[in-house]
Image (cartoon, grey):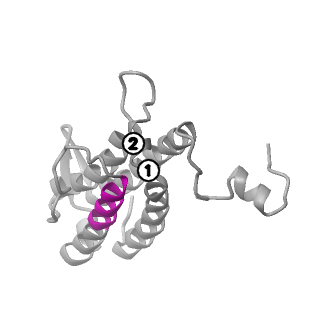
Amino acid sequence: MFVKIEEFIEAWTEESKLTERIMEALTDASLSQPIVEGRRTLGQIAWHLVGSIHYMTHCGLNFAGPAGGEHVPASAAEIAEEYHRISEALIEAVRSEWTDEQLLATTEIAGEPWPNGASLRFTLMHQAHHRGQMTVLIRQAGLRLPDVYGPTYESWIEQGMEPLA
């Protein structure tokens, strides 16, 4: 749970940059890559990440949701741009509308009280969860992964090093 606004902003800024790198690796063609037949596609997961940030408005923050609502754009660039916009909007809303004390205030979610700082932590971890799913689908779509928490197989090779197993 976050108890300091600046701690959240620092963590979100770092993690959202990683998510942006994943979003920028997408192509329009890759958006249709499914997990398995009949389940979410890479594009749907990417757009879900965009929209899920707006969930924080249920905790009292005010910022615009995704342009186009729930309709998944056919453009990977549009998804990446909208992710960047809404991610920055979240930071600005937290910075301008809440104080450290308000991170302890609770909002009822699924019948239980959730501190705002816990909702921010959940939102951050939710991004990491789906970012992981996206990396697998990006590979399955035949695209190159960006380095996230460390080098990819291709990065190791390019550096003249033996990739770790």
| Residue 84 on the magenta segment | yes
Q: Nearer the viewer, residue 95 or 78?
A: 78
The location of residue 133, given as percent across then percent down, is 48, 40
First to last magenta residue range: 76-87
Location of residue 6 (image quadrant): bottom left
* In the depicted structure, whether residue 122 falls above or below residue 30: below
Element carrying mark 2:
helix
Is 121 left, or right, of 65 in this rendering? Answer: right
- Residues under numbered marks 2 and 1 in contact, where contact means CB atoms less than 8 Å apart: yes
**Predominant secondary structure in magenta?**
helix
| Residue occupying the point 21% across, 78% down | 96
Is 54 left, or right, of 120 in this rendering? Answer: left
* In the depicted structure, whether residue 49 falls above or below residue 33: below
| Residue occupying the point 28% across, 49% down | 52
Please state which amino acid type lies under the numbered disc 1: Thr
Q: Nearer the viewer, residue 122 or 99?
A: 122
From the image, tell me which residue sits under label 2: 31
| Residue 97 on the magenta segment | no
Say few, some or many: other residues with alpha carbon within 10 Å of mark 1 (under 14 / 14 to 19 / 20 or more): some
Say few, some or many: other residues with alpha carbon within 10 Å of mark 2 (under 14 / 14 to 19 / 20 or more): many
State the separation of the CA atoms marked 2 and 1.
Answer: 7 Å
Element carrying mark 1:
loop
From the image, tell me which residue sits under label 1: 27
Is 1 left, or right, of 58 in this rendering? Answer: right
